[in-house]
Each structure stands twice: as structure tokens, then as C-alpha cells.
Amino acid sequence: MKRIMLTGNQVFRGELILVNADHAYRGNTRRKRVDMGGTALAEVAADALCAAMEKLGGWEKIAAVSGWRSFKEQQEIWDESMRENGEAFTKKYVAVPGHSEHQTGLAIDLGLRKEEIDFIRPDFPYEGICQTFRENAAKYGFVERYPAGKENVTGIGHEPWHFRYVGAVHASLMQKEALVMEEYVPYLKRFIHGETPRKMELDGREVLVSFQKAEAFGPTEIEVDERAEVSVSGNNVDGFVVVQYIRCGMTRDRAISKLNVV
Ligand SMILES: [Zn+2]
């Protein structure tokens, strides 16, 4: 077993942080970001999005409309929408400044390329290349964050254009269980770290997902399998979500036996 120390601040960082009206973004505002042709994303999300778009030939028809925003930019978008569209529209489609996923650098609004793209509500239909991207999004770690039918859970209107990077493990589980982040983050709490992890398979690898509540005072120590590749994200509420990719050695053995056959 290997021990990992997690600081209190790490609760507010990582790809699975829940950011909404109840949970403000308190993470690292200086994290590394990559320019996406006019807008920017956190490096991990930018790499995943580019990989998906290159594979699907998406950039020819799809534009990255809005990615990372500073608090100030979110405030400006909010103020302008309040002036031009009124309160009801703004509350439905624009997150309160300080509470926007766009401030994390992990969210992206995508729109079909055309002469005039609506900045707040870009066109991203459930057909053609947009739907192809949507159907493949989980593989690259993205989820459609505000789906139809979950408006009362997310607190945001249906947004076919807004995608959030959470990583392939969480995106696959969320899709399988049909959960949005507001449901998925509490759902994970039953999979207590070191006791009852959620097991799954991804690309032929065994993966364990578990939850560790943060200590009220001081750092939190966890034990992980030393053979595993480990990634930990805060949930921006009260703890950490641990993902362990188990290396079972099977892949190498299979590769060797394949070589022998050749
Ligand atoms: Zn958005």
C-alpha cells in the first residue's frame, strides 16, 4: 500500500469539482490554460477536446465558442444579459458570477460554424457532426452538462452546447447511470475508499472509484494500491474522489504470448 496526503485546498481542485449555484468555484485561478482559437481551456480539457475533434474531423464544422472565463468576464456576461435579455432568461442560461463552470477552465460551449454564432446559446443540434461528437464525448472525458429533463436538478436550462470535462472514467459512469454532476457527486459517497469501491472496466483495464471524506482539520491521508495508477480530484463539497487504474500485468502477458505466436 502507498500513502497519499491530501490538503484541505485540494477539495476545491480537480476534474470532478461540482460548481453550481450552491457551490462556488474556489479553485486555482492560475492553472495552466491552452488557447483554443479565441477562447481557452485548462490543459487537460484542451488536450482531450482536440483529440476528439481530430479523430472526428470536428473542427471543420464546430467552433469553440466559449471556454475559460475569469470572474470579471462572467460578471460582464451576466450584466449584459440582464440588460438585454432580462432576469428570467439570464437566470436560466447564465450562471451567477463566481458559480460558473466556465471559471474552472473545464467547460466549453461548442457551436456549429456559421456567419453569426449566438454567444450565449450557440446552435449544437442533436444530429450530424454535433451529435457524433456528443455520442463520443464520454470516451474523451466530456459530458453534456445540462441535459433536458434535469433542469430542476442542475438549476440551469437545457443547454445542448455546454460540455464539461470530468475525465473518461467519470464521464462513462455518469452516462451509464444517467446522472448529472449534482447527482453523481453524492452518488459516489456510498463507495467508501478502502471499503466498498465502485468497480468498472475502461479500455480493458480494471478501475476502482471511491470516495474519501476530507478531515475537518488538517490534511487527509489515504492508502492506495501501489501497483495502481492513481488520480484524485476534490468534489468541491466535502471530500475526494479517488480513481485507481489497476495494473494486473495481463496486458503485458498477452502481448508476449501474441509475439510468441507471430
Ligand atoms: Zn457554457
Image (spheres, helix red, strand yellow):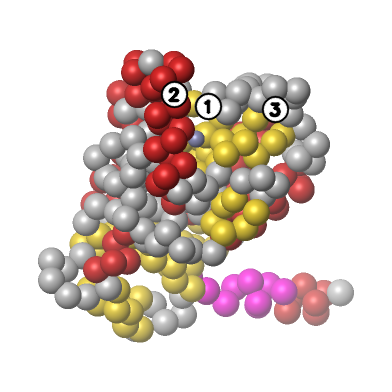
Q: From the image, which quarter does the C terminus lie in?
A: bottom right
Circle nearer the viewer, 1 or 3 = 1
Amino acid type assigned to the residue bearing label 2 in the image: Ser
Give the magenta range: 246-255
Task: Indicate whether 241 appears above or below 128.
Answer: below
What is the chief secondary structure element of the magenta stretch? helix
Q: Quadrant of residue 258?
A: bottom right
Neighbour tally class for label 1: few under 14, some 14-19, many 20 plus, Cα within 10 Å? some
Task: Indicate whether 166 appears above or below 214.
Answer: above
Marks 2 and 1, Cα distance to the nearest angstrom? 9 Å
* Left or right side of 255 for 251: left
Neighbour tally class for label 2: few under 14, some 14-19, many 20 plus, Cα within 10 Å? some
Task: Indicate whether 258 appears above or below 70.
Answer: below
Residue 177 appears in the rendering: no
Circle nearer the viewer, 2 or 3 = 2
Point out which mark residue 120 bears: 1
**Mark 3 highlights which residue?**
112
Secondary structure under badge 2? Answer: helix
Circles 2 and 3, Cβ within 8 Å, touching? The answer is no
Marks 2 and 3, Cα distance to the nearest angstrom? 22 Å
Q: What residue lies at 44% left-to-right and 71% top-to-bottom?
A: 230
* Left or right side of 183 for 114: right
**Mark 2 highlights which residue?**
81
